[in-house]
Amino acid sequence: MSDTSPPSARWSRRLPILVIAIVAVAGAIALREQVSFEALSQHREALIAFRDSHYLWASLGFVLAYTAIVAFSLPGATVATLTGGFLFGLFPGTLFNVGAATIGAVLIFLAARAGFGADVAAGLDRRGGAPARLMAALRENEWSALFLMRLVPAVPFFLANLIPAFVGASLWRFAITTFFGIIPGGLVFTSVGAGLGEVFASGGTPDLSIIFAPHVLGPILGLAALSALPMLLRLWRKGA
């Protein structure tokens, strides 16, 4: 169904996603060197001192900063995850990381859906053909598709926030699958961050390739296979 609302109303709905796009471009240019492992290493003592003297404010400030990084698609999400583990340990570091990433993802999902999501979905429905069939398939297998996008990092995180908004995915399903789908990877990177004290002491850099180690990647791929099973069974029944 076409949007018959006044142009001013349409632009007011699109303003949040346009602001996000502008901030994302500006942030990619301005923050490229500011949010890095080297910056964390240089400021680690000041961060630890602030955490020790103002734990509540440090926790709130970290969650808000991480949420902003995700919501505005700014560089530094990996460094932020490591920082969460470094400052707060595996727990509550993982909870802070996963919670902030989920809130940021929901915010950009809402902005994209309000701004252009309805128009894109309506356009695909009108055109029909393969795009419309793909959108229908994603809606029919929403739980499996959303979990897969989170568990298997084949789709960049910011695209995994936008695509569901453009195909009309349910907000609560998006939020739930985001929270639980990023926990495995969040646990791995937060645990790496929790061990950064020794890395800093030795003058090394964190080994992020651990995510591809068989004992780590295997269980994640197993979870991905389980999440895809309902979709595969549905397709098999249709074929039968």
Image (cartoon, grey):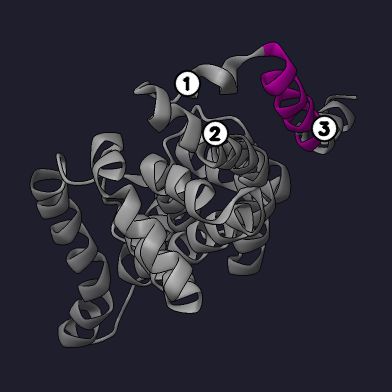
Task: Decide whether residue 226 is among the magenta residues.
Answer: yes
Check whether the beta carbons of the residues at disc 3 and disc 1 lie within 8 A of each other: no
Tag 1: amino acid: Asp
Quadrant of residue 48 in the image? bottom left
Q: Nearer the viewer, mark 2 or mark 3?
A: 2
Q: How many numbered marks, from 0 up?
A: 3
Q: Image quadrant for the C terminus? A: top right
Q: Name the residue carrying label 2.
A: 192
Tag 2: amino acid: Val
Q: Name the residue carrying label 1.
A: 207
Question: At x 30% / y 39%, what residue is drawn?
Answer: 41
Question: How far is mark 2 from mark 3, CA to CA?
Answer: 26 Å
Q: Which residues are magenta?
A: 214-227
Q: Taking the image as drawn, is residue 119 in sight?
A: no
Q: What secondary structure predominates along the stretch shown in magenta?
A: helix
Q: With respect to residue 211, does 32 lie above or below?
A: below
**Picture coordinates of residue 150, whole percent (x, y):** 59, 41
Tag 3: amino acid: Leu
Q: Is residue 71 left or right of residue 141?
A: left
Label 1 vs 2, first from the N-terminus: 2
Check whether the beta carbons of the residues at disc 1 and disc 2 lie within 8 A of each other: yes
Identify the mark at residue 226; answer none if there is no mark. 3
Question: At x 61% / y 52%, what residue is drawn?
Answer: 94
Q: Is residue 221 left or right of residue 15?
A: right
Question: At x 60% / y 38%, what residue is drawn?
Answer: 191
